[in-house]
Image (spheres, grey):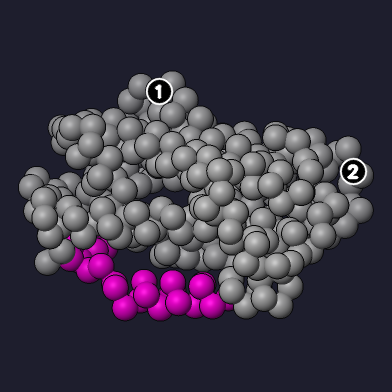
Amino acid sequence: MIPEGAPPPAQGALPFKRLLLVLGVVATVYAAALLVWGDSPKTSLALLWSWTGVQAAGLCLLNYLLRGLRWRLWMAHYNRHFGWLQGLRLYLAGYAFTPTPGNVGEAARGLMLARRPLGPVQSLAIFGAERLADLLCLLLLCLPALGWLLRHGAVQSAPALLVGLLAAGAVLLSVAGGLLFVYRAKILARFAWLREAWHCLAVRPWLWFGLTLVAWAAQGLAVWLVCRAMNVHLELLTATGFYAVAMVAGALSALPAGLGGTEAVLTGLLVAQGATPAAALAVTVLVRLLTLWLAVAIGVLALLYSAAIRKEISLR
């Protein structure tokens, strides 16, 4: 997070070279992993163009749409009103910054607006509200994975132990949330952006909670569809729980877009469930292409279109 009093990020600093470097490294690692450990990489990647791939991609797009509506709601809280398509396009443009540590680059969404951009505190506030809402709903979706752990014994494998540690982490986060609630006056008084984030979360809480929960559940359904197509058999709620655990693990790692941590956890959980390492790896690569890199690609296109054609975003 950007500390209190720090200068705002540069409004036009889309790090194209750094983004291309990250994309190149990730593509190389994914391709190498599929070639070395995967089972028929060409067949696995062909799933992206199948009916199952189209369905999974549609569910991921639904995730972006619902979270875009949530962002539009919070922007309206600061009297920044957009039409449906305009608001969604501006929200999607922020995904170009997802491959940053802790996704903090997405905080630049409000700063890039060409007309009436948000101040750094307000932009950070919406980013903080987004991350808190996402974390809350992902922790709820982790519960089926905890049930899976209890059914399979406490520590039968390293992935099972990891799930237990993440469950303990969820408890600690809950305790931290309780302390935040008890001492919120002192904490919010010290950090202006956090106080603003709290105000965002107070805006129609059941609406943003419903949008967020359905959004992440949609991606969980996409993961289940990919697993089924790859002959990895597990229940819908379990697949959703595994994905949620992997996402939380990636977020806690603070690595750009959770790279490495999310993939390792999801692959390990699928292997612990009974999938072969090759199938688990193929599922993980396909899931990340659909749930992460599809968003980044759409974000780059939306950013360039909004900046070069619509003139709604300033990159200078």
Q: Quadrant of the N terminus?
A: bottom left
Few, some or many residues within 10 Å of mark 1 (<14, 14–19, 20+): few
Is residue 21 found inside the magenta-colored segment of the image?
Answer: yes
Indicate the quadrant where residue 170 lies. Answer: top right
Distance of label 1 from label 2 (alpha carbons)? 36 Å
Say which amino acid is labelled 1. Answer: Leu
Q: Quadrant of the C terminus?
A: bottom left
Left or right: residue 163 compared with residue 96? right
The stretch of residues the image draws in magenta is 1-29
Is residue 61 found inside the magenta-colored segment of the image?
Answer: no
Q: Nearer the viewer, residue 306 or 41?
A: 41
Say which amino acid is labelled 2. Answer: His
Q: Secondary structure at mark 2?
A: loop
Left or right: residue 156 compared with residue 244? right
Q: Residue at x 79, y 43 (%)?
A: 233
**Upstream in the sequence, badge 1 or badge 2?**
2
Indicate the quadrant where residue 282 lies. Answer: bottom right
Q: Secondary structure at mark 1?
A: helix
Circle 1 sits on which residue?
207
As drawn, 34 above or below 311: below
Q: Residue at x 44, y 55 (%)?
A: 294
Q: Is residue 78 visible?
A: no
Residue 86 circle label: none
Q: Nearer the viewer, residue 248 or 262?
A: 262
As drawn, 130 above or below 45: above
Indicate the quadrant where residue 108 lies. Answer: bottom left
| Dot 1 and dot 2 residues touching (CB under 8 Å) | no
Q: Where does the image place residue 19, in percent across and percent down from the top left?
A: 36, 72
Circle 2 sits on which residue?
152
Q: Residue at x 29, y 72 (%)?
A: 15
Q: Where does the image place residue 50, in percent across and percent down from the top left?
A: 56, 49
Q: Where does the image place residue 31, in percent across and percent down from the top left?
A: 59, 74
